[in-house]
Image: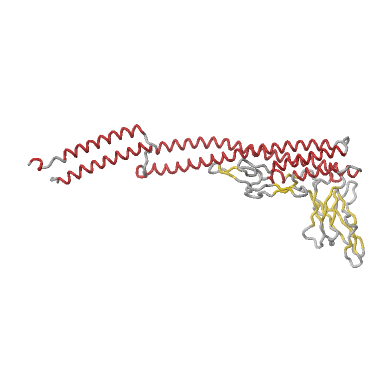
Amino acid sequence: MRISTSQIFQSGLSAMQNAQAKLNHTSLQMSTGRRILTPSDDPSGAAQSVQLDAAIKATEQYQRNGDYAQPRLEQEEAQIDAVQNALQRVRELVIAGSNDTYNQSNRNIIASEIRQLRDDIFDIANTQDANGEYLFAGTRSQTSPFVMADDGRVSYVGAEGDGAVRELAITSTRRIAVGDTGATVLMEIPERSGLLTEAVPKSTNTGTVDVVKVEAGNLDDALNSAGQNLRIRFKFPTVNPGSVEYQILDPDGNSVQDSSGQLIGGVYGSTDGAGVFVPPTPNTPIEFAGRRVTLDPLTAPADGDEILSRPVPQVSLFQTLDSIATALETPQSDETAQDLFAKASSMALRNIDSGMDRLNEVRTAVGLRLSTLEIQTDLNAERQLNLESTLSDVRDLDYADAISRYKLQETVLQAAQQTYVQTSKLSLFDFL
């Protein structure tokens, strides 16, 4: 077979170029430390590397989330502990203030300390973390969650409801709350005494009757009816003019009896000759079962109208502290005042205990989150190490193999170059 001179030159040149390309590729691998420089080097390995790299970055983000959540949860736990200490002190003061040997001056001093402790809890409730975010504001972390009105009443204005607390992912399938709302911790405390009640007109009433005040009545009766739902039903006379009566019923519509077995009821106003309601003396309350309900004198019930008297389901810690401080500041000049103070003390102690239980629940939940976070952080660190090791096995260069291959490719290139030099001399013109 005839081989032209141009073919000989082209073959030699191609051999040198191929050898040079392989040598350059190996040199680049050695300089980067990577076995896979382009997907064509190892299509399967390249795809696996992309997946491993994405998993490593996700795990790093989970670790950053944990680094953000841990100090917030630790700070929340510390603030809850401070509130618990303050409440424990309030409890001691309430018990001391109930001592009959204390005079009004002593009780005023106790009330002053309780109000100071309430202010301390208010400040704790508006605590900020290192980033300037409010701990108990939920997702509205840039705004103070608690505000105090001119009359001293405390309200919660932070986030509430579903999604009110920020959650961060610590794995692909697990998220952890990085706080609790102030509503959960301090405002929505279960009312445990059963003595704090509210009165609400029934929605199906045909009259305009409305409630302006709900107060405590006789302590013994209040304790006997604690936690009960009762109804005040108005009954108009069949002949006018006449007295408007009211009955106290249970939720099933049965008449309620007092401790002596008498049906509870009475007269509230009357009707004139035309059947129009005539209210009693303004601010005359309806008293029953240790409860005192005052109606708006500008409104009027209709025959069969009802008012629902029921325990308040929740009470805020601030309301509890304000109420007992006010009770301590009120002079106990007669037996009625002493009875009201005894009831206020009983309500305060039970609701303070309820608040302590809520704080313990939240603190336990925070502790569980911290424990979970610690365990998951260790697992994520181990997972990240395994992923990086696997990625190194797939993508990184074996230098011993690369150096050996580089030396071989360098020898091949030198041989190709020397062969080309020798071949380039094989011309007839050199022998003429």
Q: Does residue 136 appear left or right of residue 228 in this picture?
A: left
Q: Position of residue 422 (x, y in %)?
A: 16, 38
Q: Quadrant of residue 170?
A: top right
Number of disc labels: 0
Q: Does residue 183 appear left or right of residue 373 in this picture?
A: right
- Residue found at x 89% / y 66%: 275
Q: Quadrant of the N terminus?
A: top left
Q: Position of residue 77 (x, y in %)?
A: 66, 37
Q: Quadrant of the C terminus?
A: top left
In the displayed structure, 58 sits above or below 272; it is: above
> What is the image's colouring?
secondary structure
Q: Does residue 61 appear left or right of residue 27 in this picture?
A: right
Q: Position of residue 174 (x, y in %)?
A: 56, 43
- Residue found at x 45% / y 42%: 53
In the displayed structure, 313 sits above or below 90; it is: below
> Relative to the observer, which residue lies in front, 103 or 201?
103
Q: Does residue 369 appear left or right of residue 308 in this picture?
A: left
Q: Position of residue 346 (x, y in %)?
A: 82, 41
Residue most extreme to the left? 432
Residue most extreme to the bottom? 274
> Relative to the observer, which residue lies in front, 219 or 332?
332
Q: Quadrant of residue 94?
A: top right
